[in-house]
Image (spheres, rainbow, N blue to C red):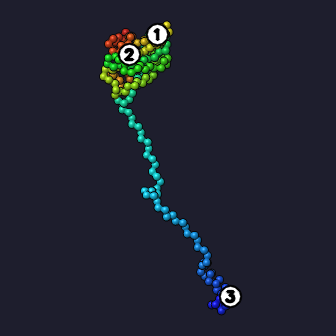
Amino acid sequence: LECFGGDAERAADWLINERSTTGSDTNAPAAPATPVNHRAAPSGASASASAPPPPPMTPATPTTAQRRVRVFVEHCSNIKDGSKLSNINFAVTLVDAGGAALEPAATTPMGAASPRADGSVIFNANVDLKATYGSLPEGCAVILELRHFKAKDKKMSTKCWAFVPRDRMRLGQPVEVPTLQKPADPKRKACKNFNKGAP
């Protein structure tokens, strides 16, 4: 008011004119500052997303020597009265060169075989042994006994038998062997064909 000789009206006009010229209110409160986080990032931290975990390792495929021996019994031919036999199965035994069993005998499922009128018996059954191909000793063999149930004697009886020597045991390769007259000889000394002139 001093500058305008105590004239309040002139002082008010000047103040309004001054504010319109500057375009701002010098007495308006300042906008709050944007907060800044001064916390330091942990050592070794990365701004990018964490890397995905590595894929699980694929188990190594076992070698032939590490695989267990699997005997697949496909069929047996020229079995006289085969269609009349009941509860037919094959007993499979791994024996050493002297005929001693290397592990307990295993069998195809009881009664799962399909006898046919032509004398053949269809099995299509697997028998897994405990031995691996790499553990088979020299001179060993797999003894196969075709058995059936005799109601009269109330027991399983051997019809005929066959054997597969060690040198013919190959992973995934079929083997055809002749049927032999009973009784089975694990030493493989007495081997006569079950059917004359036919394996």
Which residue is tagged 3?
8
Badge 3 marks a residue whose secondary structure is: helix
Quadrant housing residue 45:
bottom left
Q: Earlier in the sequence, mark 1 or mark 3?
A: 3
Three-letter code for the amino acid on which mark 1 is drawn: Asp
Three-letter code for the amino acid on which mark 2 is drawn: Ala
**Residue at x 67% of width, y 85% of height:** 12
Visible residue check, residue 5: yes
Q: Counting other residues with Cα less than 10 Å from the Cα at mark 3, is it few (<14), some (14-19), or many (20 or more)?
A: few
- Locate the C terminus by quadrant: top left
Quadrant housing residue 194:
top left
Q: Earlier in the sequence, mark 2 or mark 3?
A: 3
What percent of the width, then of the height, locates residue 38?
49, 64
Badge 2 marks a residue whose secondary structure is: strand
Which residue is tagged 1?
81
Quadrant housing residue 16:
bottom right
What percent of the width, then of the height, locates residue 106?
43, 20
Which residue is tagged 2?
162
Q: CA distance from mark 1 to mark 3?
A: 138 Å
Please say if 55 is above or below 137.
below
Three-letter code for the amino acid on which mark 3 is drawn: Ala
What percent of the width, then of the height, locates residue 82?
46, 12
Q: Is residue 108 left or right of residue 9?
A: left
Q: Which residue is outermost to the right?
A: 9
Q: Earlier in the sequence, mark 2 or mark 1?
A: 1
- Nearer mark to the viewer, of 2 and 1: 2
- Locate the N terminus by quadrant: bottom right
Q: Is residue 84 left or right of residue 62?
A: right
Please say if 18 is above or below 155.
below
Q: Which residue is outermost to the left?
A: 138
